[in-house]
Image (cartoon, helix red, strand yellow):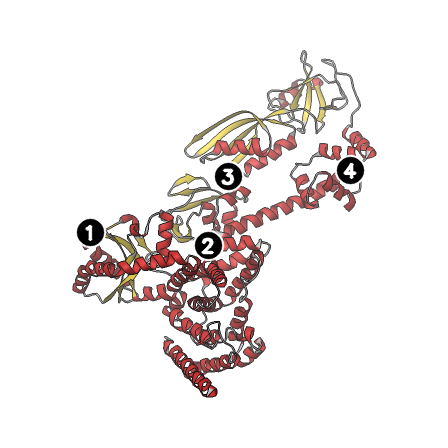
Amino acid sequence: MEEEIQDKEASVENKEIVNKYRALLRSIERKTEAADKKLIRKAFNLAMDAHSEVRRKSGEPYILHPIAVATIVAKEIGLGPTSIAAALLHDVVEDSDYTLEDIERIFGEKIARIIDGLTKISGVFDQNISVQAENFRKMLLTISDDVRVILIKLADRLHNMRTMQSMPAHKQLKIASETLFIYAPLAHRLGLYNIKTELEDLSLKYTEPEVYRDIVLKVKASKASEIKYLKRFSSKIRDALKKENFEFTIKERTKSIFSIRRKMVNQKIPFEKVYDKFAMRIIVDSTPENEKADCWKVYSVVTDFYRPNPDRLRDWISSPKSNGYESLHTTLMGSDGHWVEVQIRSERMDSIAEKGYAAHWKYKEDKSDDLKLDNWINKIRDLLENPNQNAVEFIDNFKLNLFSEEIFLFTPKGDLRVLPKGSSPIDFAFDIHTEVGSTILGSKVNGKLVPLSHKLKSGDQVEILTSQKQKPKEDWLNYVVTSKAKGKIKQSLKDDKNRVSDGGRAVLERKLNFIKVKPTDSTIQKMVNYYKLKNPTELYYKVGTGIIENKHLKEFAKENSTTFYTYLKSRFRSVPKEKAPKPDEKVKSTLVFGDNDQALDYNLAQCCTPIAGDKVFGFITSNAGIKVHRNDCPNAVSLQSRFANRIVKAKWKLNTDNDFTANITIKGIDTVGLVNKVTQIISNNLNVNIKSMNIAANDGVFEGKIALIVEDKIHLNSIIEKLRNAEGVERVTREK
């Protein structure tokens, strides 16, 4: 008797499996050739064999899951036989004795590659966050090989979400959270709006079950009256479109539970205050060459009866989204004060909106089933370009780009660029080309100069101003949102730091050799420890940038070796003590200014304001001792020709304890907060006192003079270099 019951149950199950398989074949949109049917049948038979003894948590035969996934792939995404076969086989390698080599031998390299990709990413979210992130990066690497891996994975996730009721609550919460975290945004980016919406709703069902049930009940309660209202609302439109001889379909739809919840949270309003819970879609039967004009004609008809909200018009027909989405959205005021969202699109546009890239490629008449989504995949490759990027940072950047709204921008020549909302001119420049982004000096938006931190808006025309002297700055990272811009800036900063470090290493070795100290690994490590640095690279960088100077080396030497310090001290003093020269007395030896051991009565000439490190000469005055002039002083030629007998050969001793006044001229593009920015660079970043500052702007260009208190020429040059690299600064020169 028991055997009879088991046989009956098996018979019922087999019948269900056969029915589901036949439904799968019926769901295939494109014409199925005999070879395609044979391929799908072969995949089904192997999957049946592999999963014959396996059941799901619900108790049903496991084979029903791959059949369901394959049906979603065929019917809801619109992929072809290769993808359907891969969907039927997606769990075979992971859950049975069949190997990848077996799959390749039976089905060929293409299907084996897809199965390999699906197997590799099956455990993306099973470990801690950093490992998850790294695994997700690997998953995205498969996209650049074959996007069908992700499409099938989304179908797999959708069916799992639909059949989660048998799982324990903690598993439900985990899977639902993962879905909201990455799978729903991925579906959105791939243009699979129906799947994205269902994934979000199902996720909310398990993450906030009470909220979900409450909204569902309220929607059901008001649905009948709302649909009745929409029918009344659309009746005038239907009659008018028929008079215009349009072939069309009108669909009334309810907004997703998740989107209603999001609006309630974002706007802090109750369910009753969400007025656009229901929407209407007008789908026009039109030819590709006429569909754009027909959609706008329909818009004209619709607005003859109802007043549109001008702030809510969204034209994704003229400028489609980067995932291929095309539609015309408007929000109309009904007769009783209710807002109604109306979407207008052609049948082709509707198909793309429903099934994303798969439909997009079908309409491009690509019969190969080899979906090469060049633009999107190229962006993925940009993200994956930098192997040194922190994995968690990577996934955050990627998610940002998945979730972001888009804005439409134009080049001066009228070329369209699509970027995430919140993008800056720097993002725009890097989107054009890495070289343009790396050398951006300023930008004009709609003909007006704006700072690089300016947030662009849809419709802006952006002109990028570049300079070959320019290079990426660290503060740019505060203004950019695109992963490409962030990655390129960080890489440039890293390369720049490495270059400075290499130069600093050579400088340090030279200085150590100069004082007869071998730059051994042991000496370098002592210096790293002494200056409390992380590694030798940081030491070389600080030497290369002038942060660690000769005086710091002296301090290190003094504490580590008495002999070292004595030798260093002797090398910095090349001139013995001399008595102060008297006026009109010609001094034949070279004077060293700045040496405290020399009793020299000298003053700095105001005509050229020399500082330590300048090439200088001394001029013996009649009553003011020696005046120190720069060799390039405006008065140098006159003094040296008229008073040759009073000229003294001289040089500066570096690393004096004295301070000097240096005057610089600065010029560039006028930006908001410019003065504050310049003072921050000088005072905060470089710890330099400003004696005086005078900056004026005219017609978008600023020019000014700044008097600084500096230690020596090296110090001044470091300041000038940093100011030259500041946003908007074109030229910085020292006054003569």
Instruction: Name the residue carrying label 3.
Output: 727
Secondary structure beneath label 4 = helix
Number of other residues with Cα within 10 Å of mark 1, as a class: few under 14, some 14 to 19, many 20 or more: few
| Helix, strand or loop status at disc 3 | loop
Q: Nearer the viewer, residue 567 or 625?
A: 567
Task: Tell whether label 1 touches label 3 (CB within 8 Å).
Answer: no
Q: CA distance from mark 3 to mark 2?
A: 26 Å
**Percent coordinates x, y for residue 424 in the rendering:** 45, 45
Tag 2 residue: 401
Dot 4 corresponds to which residue?
514
Q: CA distance from mark 2 to mark 4?
A: 53 Å
- Mark 2: give few (<14), some (14-19) or many (20+) Cα within 10 Å: many
- State the separation of the CA atoms marked 3 and 4: 39 Å
**Which amino acid lies under the numbered mark 3 shown in the image of this protein?**
Glu
Task: Say which element carries label 2.
Answer: helix
Q: Work out whether residue 609 or residue 674 is closer to the camera in this orientation and state it.
A: 674
Mark 3, mark 4: which one is toward the viewer?
3
Compare marks 3 and 1 and give the one earlier in the sequence.
1
Question: Reading the chain from its start, which is encountered first: label 3 or label 4?
Answer: 4
Q: Amino acid at mark 4?
A: Phe
Residue named by callout 1 = 336
Residue 31 place in picture, x, y as percent: 37, 78
Residue 595, image x, y percentages: 74, 24
Q: Amino acid at mark 1?
A: Asp
Does label 1 or label 2 sit earlier along the sequence?
Answer: 1
Placement of 109 over or under 317, stated as above or below: below
Q: Residue furthest top?
A: 623
